[in-house]
Image (cartoon, rainbow, N blue to C red):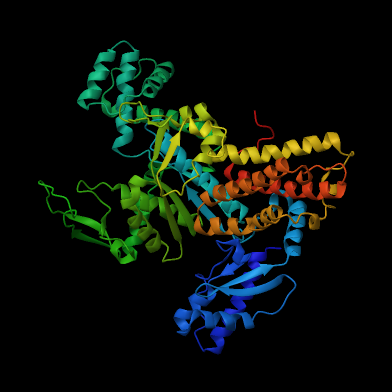
Amino acid sequence: MNIFLFIKDIIFTAVKNELSENNLPNDFSLKNISVEPPRDKNFGDISTNAAMILAKHLKENPKSISKKLIERIPKCDEIISINIAGPGFINFHINNSVWFSIMNDVLSQGLSYGSNESGAGKLINIEYVSANPTGPLHVGHARGGVFGDALANLLSKSGYNVTKEYYINDAGSQVYSLGRAVYFRYLEELGLKDSKDFEQAIKSGQIEYGGDYVKDIATSLVENYNDKWVSENEEDWLEPITDFAINKMIFLIKEDLDLLGIRHDIFISEKKIVQDGKVNKAVENLEQLNLLYNGILTPPKGKVIEDWEPREQLLFRSSNFGDDVDRPIRKSDGSWTYFASDIAYHQDKIDRGFKEMINVWGADHSGYVKRIKSSVTALSSSQANLDVKLCQLVKLFDEGKPIKMSKRTGTFITLRELVDSVGKDVVRFIMLTRKNDVSLDFDFTKVLEKSRDNPVFYVQYAFARIQSVFRHAQKELPDDFISDKNLKKGDFKNCILEEELDIMKLISSWPRIIELATNSHEPHRIVFYLYELASAFHILWNKGNENAELRFLNKDNLNISLSRLALIKCVSITLASGLEILDVTPVEEMR
């Protein structure tokens, strides 16, 4: 049973009846009506703001509306009492039997507890990481990768058919800059250039990418082609060497992502999108919709550009769909803009049947959001929806001292170095301890601390403690006592301590948390919930340390032991379910 959905149905029915009686439109939106635990548990178990939402439309006092709604709620065994608090909140006190019943559901359903079918098998595309294949992945990519991967797992748990996608930006000047850097190192490997020449080329700006990875690619190039390209002109070697470098970088990127447990379903090449004529097709579609015109853009606002020359360009009417200005899709030299390629890429997603899309980008792409969303709206005739989630920067520290990064000089902290330093599970968990649009501090020392202040330790410690209880139970109690079959016989009426009931109520809210996190595309809510549940368990554990009669194992009263073991089994199942979404390993034993 999902008690929150049960109460929501009751409230929504009461609201609809009240609206009908007041002759208000049937299309009145119920989405702003919340049904959730009150901030202060003394007010009850579940609270709703329905009366305040209705008050704006009925033009009545919220408390008066609360009374009317309560009168419409039928009596049932699940609800002990209903009261009104504050400006008009309706608070429900739930019968303990409901919590007991839900715990039985948890034991029966196992890790599937909390899953739902709200997605109904709907296709959804999540594109994340998508770093330019011009260098190794860094810490910022780790955050976007973890966010996208956890969100994909979350949506799958809610019944969506998820495709995890990586868009390879392998067209344009940046990748050719990589090709030139590799060629320079290639000549060096063959003894035709000196390392000092490369350093000078970097300083002068002749070469853009100078990390050790460039040298590694060049070494591999020599192994595969020897001196084949030495006497060739740039127009002959640039394309094949750039392709070679990109393939090597994508292989390394996949290896790095694998270290973090991230495996995409599809890799889409921008270069192939262009070569297959999909940009032309997307432009033709926009022309048919009368959404392209030749025009002159005004200078960027807030910027003084001395050499600004107004020139006629092919523009997309993106301002018709919420963008600030119309956007160019063809450069003055006749080539397509990056935006044109991105339009074609999203047209390709639509053509593949995706009406729901999520792009996970770095914060530096914030100015690009409106234009790409406008293109999706236009190309799909408003039938497709794109949600863009921006991930803010990760600030690295060690013992409180900041660590600086520089991608240009090749001294940035790579994703591989990050995982090697603290481990996959720590990286994945910590990257979700803040909402994606808030900057995140990552201290190499603190994330390995064994304290309550380290959330990943605190959650894993709760799970490990529960496993230790069961190991002791296996030794001290009768054979087969802790089997799943036997635990289902536990009577939760024996678990009526305030701390035990608090845990049951938290576990009962797990399906609601999954629903909220899914609908808002916010996997950090899972981390917050797991920390709260772990804290509630640790409080109960400490109670047992203070009073032997409250411990989980009681040889003198096996019925109580069975009930308490069943309860903490529910805790471990719920923790494991949440960690599964994060792809973080539940630790059986802390070392």
Give the camera-side residue of 175 and 78. Answer: 78
Q: x and y percent of residue 556 in the render?
A: 88, 44
Image vertical order of residue 551 relative to residue 224, above or below: below
Q: In which quarter of the image is residue 5?
A: bottom right
Image vertical order of residue 326 relative to residue 544, above or below: below
Q: Which residue is drawn at 46% across and 27% down?
A: 417
Q: Residue 34: in sight, yes or no?
A: yes
Give the camera-side residue of 361 and 537. Answer: 537
Q: Residue at x 56, y 86 (%)?
A: 20
Q: Which residue lies furthest to the left in this view?
A: 306
Looking at the rendered structure, the number of numbered marks drawn on it comes to 0
Left or right relative to 288: residue 359: right
Left or right relative to 424: residue 242: left
Q: x and y percent of residue 82 in the render?
A: 64, 74
Left or right relative to 316: residue 526: right
Q: x and y percent of residue 39 in the render?
A: 55, 61
Q: Residue at x 51, y 89 (%)?
A: 23
Q: In which quarter of the image is residue 117?
A: bottom right
